[in-house]
Image (cartoon, helix red, strand yellow):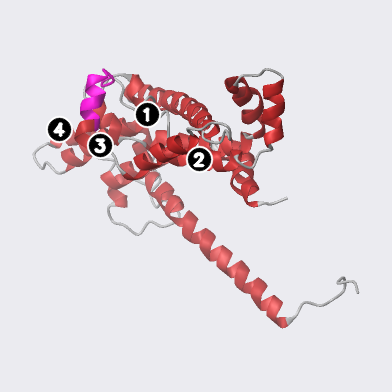
Amino acid sequence: MSSIGIKPTLGSRIFDVCNVVFMLVFTFVMLYPFVNLLAISFNDGVDAARGGIYFFPRVFSLDSYAFLFKNEKLFSGLWISILRVIVGTITCVFMTGLLAYIVTIRNFSGRKFMRLLFLITMYFSGGLIPTYLLMVQLGLTNTFNVYWIPGLLNAYYMLLMASYMQGLPESLFESARIDGASELKIYAKVVIPISLPVFAAIAVFSSVGHWNSWFDVILYNSSGTWDTLQTYLRKLLLEVEALQQIQDAQAAYSKYRNISSSTLRAAVTMVVTLPIVCVYPFMQKYFVSGITLGAVKG
């Protein structure tokens, strides 16, 4: 009997209502902090100190954003951050994907040992001081290379990509080997095109990690030559907070009279968040398929 024309039961209606209410509440909880920070960032600093700003700015002001964008160091930091994301993401995805392919080659006798070797690094590390000394000995400090070379291989990403590659038909690789293709050519011409969803998902993870990273910049870039956007904005925020705590620095504080640490912090959050958020719409298609495709059994 066709299900068309069957009226929904009372239980299904209650479930639908509860489901809609839950999703609305969940969406509100997720979006409210972002909307609240956006409203504070567009509010006058003196007025924002009173509190009570929720969804809309009470006294509209662009002083916090004007203060951020008037400094040329902001744009140099933005360029370095973008360059780090591009170089770091491409190299990490390519090299980690190559490692994942190596540990999934069935006729490679050392694949289990290599997988175990990298798994150990997920739970044990040399520590902060030995790692810093290693970077110094390698000559990576105060250079751009310190941002992407240490992150070439990621054990967790390797497990995700290897899990995906293990589900690929072995006949594809065997036919390529019969045709005389090397393992590197198989990886570039066969594995990457058919593993694009998981590569895109890992690219999102890696790009977000590089974009939000700031501690390694402070640790390995003492000269300040390669300060990223996040590090520069952090230094700027600390400078404003320090000057506002000095009661005798009225002359120095005069240029900050229309902003406060709360409005500047909100503006900094918006400046840092919006660029990386713009990446998701372009990667969502591959990201979703990369996460879910491995769970579907044919």
Closer to the observer: label 3 or label 4?
A: 3
> Residue drawn 65% across and 23% down?
189
User: Which residue is farthest right?
Assistant: 1
Closer to the observer: label 1 or label 3?
A: 3
Q: Do the residues labelled 4 and 2 touch (CB within 8 Å)?
A: no
- Percent x, y of residue 281: 59, 40
| Mark 1: secondary structure | helix
Of callouts 1 and 3, the N-terminal one: 1
- Percent x, y of residue 206: 46, 35
Of callouts 2 and 3, the N-terminal one: 3
Residue range of the region highlighted in magenta in the rendering: 131-142
Structural crowding at the residue carrying mark 3, measured as other residues with C-alpha within 10 Å and reported as few (<14), some (14–19) or many (≥20): few
Judge whether residue 132 can be spotted in this image. yes
- Percent x, y of residue 275: 48, 35
**Residue kind at label 3, given as amino acid type:** Gly
| Mark 3: secondary structure | loop
Structural crowding at the residue carrying mark 4, measured as other residues with C-alpha within 10 Å and reported as few (<14), some (14–19) or many (≥20): few
Residue at mark 2 to residue at mark 1: CA–CA distance: 20 Å
Residue 139 highlighted magenta (yes or no): yes
Structural crowding at the residue carrying mark 2, measured as other residues with C-alpha within 10 Å and reported as few (<14), some (14–19) or many (≥20): few
Residue at mark 4 to residue at mark 2: CA–CA distance: 38 Å
Q: In this view, does 76 lie to the left or right of 193?
A: left
| Mark 2: secondary structure | helix
**Residue kind at label 2, given as amino acid type:** Val
Q: Is residue 11 left or right of residue 75?
A: right
Q: Label 1, on which residue?
A: 69
- Percent x, y of residue 6: 84, 76
User: Which label sits on residue 277?
Assistant: 2
Q: Label 4, on which residue?
A: 251
Between 203 and 23, which is closer to the camera in this rendering? 203
